[in-house]
């Protein structure tokens, strides 16, 4: 069926999906249903990375087709979208992970446990790779750090403040807060603790 779909121009397919009227574009009913199923499969595949889970969700929308057919629709959607170069690496990794899982189930039924074990391991490897690739590269990208001893704080646009000036600014900010005196005193105590300021007894000489 996908061969018939590929004969249609992307513009016709897009316009059909907007109108949902197959007669308007001379599209046979079976092919029209197939296109709608592939469209839903593609949408669900963006939300559910697992082919099995995606197939279950697709079957809820189209209860008249089997779970096996739903999986085929998802694979066809990936195949069709690949012609447009819009399938991500993560999608392909998960696609092959599901294929290996399918081979695992076949070998398990056939009591070919050695091959089943290999397929299960490969499926796990592809899923781990897909998960690793899903991490945003910007989050693990190296951040440049200043390590030169020649850098001075003034060159970075920051003005130096003495300890006493910082303390005075903190008192001014605390006094302007809309809160009770008890809370102001608590905040002031925290500031004094952070700045290592304490009252000491002194004698006039």
Image: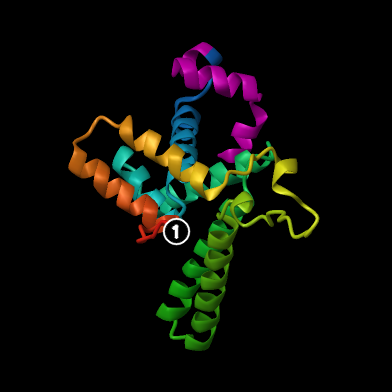
- Residue that carries the numbered disc 1 in the rendered image: 205
Image side of residue 44 versus residue 140, left or right? left
Range drawn in magenta? 1-24
- Residue 44 in the image: x percent, y percent? 43, 42
Query: Closest to the observer: 204 or 27?
Result: 204
Position of the N terminus, as image quadrant, is top right
Q: Examine the rendered structure and indicate whether residue 78 appears above or below residue 4.
A: below
Image side of residue 194 versus residue 87, left or right? left
Main SS of the magenta part reads: helix
Task: Examine the structure image and report whether residue 16 is included in the region drawn in magenta.
Answer: yes
Q: Quadrant of residue 5?
A: top right
Q: Quadrant of residue 201?
A: bottom left
Q: Examine the rendered structure and indicate whether residue 102 appears above or below residue 117.
A: above
Q: Examine the rendered structure and indicate whether residue 27 appears above or below residue 183.
A: above
**In the rendered image, is residue 41 in sight?**
yes
Query: Closest to the observer: 134 or 122?
Result: 134
Position of the C terminus, as image quadrant, is bottom left
Disc 1, SS = loop
The residue that appears at 49% across and 50% down in the rendered structure is 72
- Residue 62 in the image: x percent, y percent? 33, 39
- The residue sitting at the front extreme is 205
The residue that appears at 43% across and 31% down in the rendered structure is 33
Query: Closest to the observer: 179 or 60?
Result: 179
Task: Examine the structure image and report whether residue 197 is included in the region drawn in magenta.
Answer: no
């Amino acid at each position: 069926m996908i061969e018939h779909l590929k004969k249609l121009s992307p513009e016709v397919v897009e316009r059909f999906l907007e109108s949902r009227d197959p007669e308007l574009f001379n599209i046979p009913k079976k092919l029209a249903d197939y296109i709608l199923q592939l469209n839903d499969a593609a949408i669900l595949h963006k939300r559910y990375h697992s082919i099995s889970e995606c197939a279950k969700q697709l079957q809820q929308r189209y209860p008249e087709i089997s779970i096996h057919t739903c999986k085929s629709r998802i694979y066809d959607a990936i195949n069709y979208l690949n012609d447009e170069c819009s399938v991500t690496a993560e999608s392909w990794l998960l696609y092959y992970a599901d294929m290996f899982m399918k081979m695992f189930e076949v070998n398990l039924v056939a009591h070919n446990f050695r091959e089943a074990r290999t397929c299960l391991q490969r499926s796990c490897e592809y899923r781990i790779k897909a998960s690793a690739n899903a991490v945003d590269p910007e989050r693990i990208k190296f951040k440049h750090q200043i390590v030169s001893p020649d850098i001075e704080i003034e060159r970075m646009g920051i003005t130096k403040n003495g300890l006493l000036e910082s303390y005075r600014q903190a008192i001014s900010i605390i006094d302007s807060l809309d809160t009770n005196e008890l809370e102001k005193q608590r905040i002031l105590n925290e500031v004094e603790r952070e700045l290592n300021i304490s009252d000491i007894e002194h004698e006039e000489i």
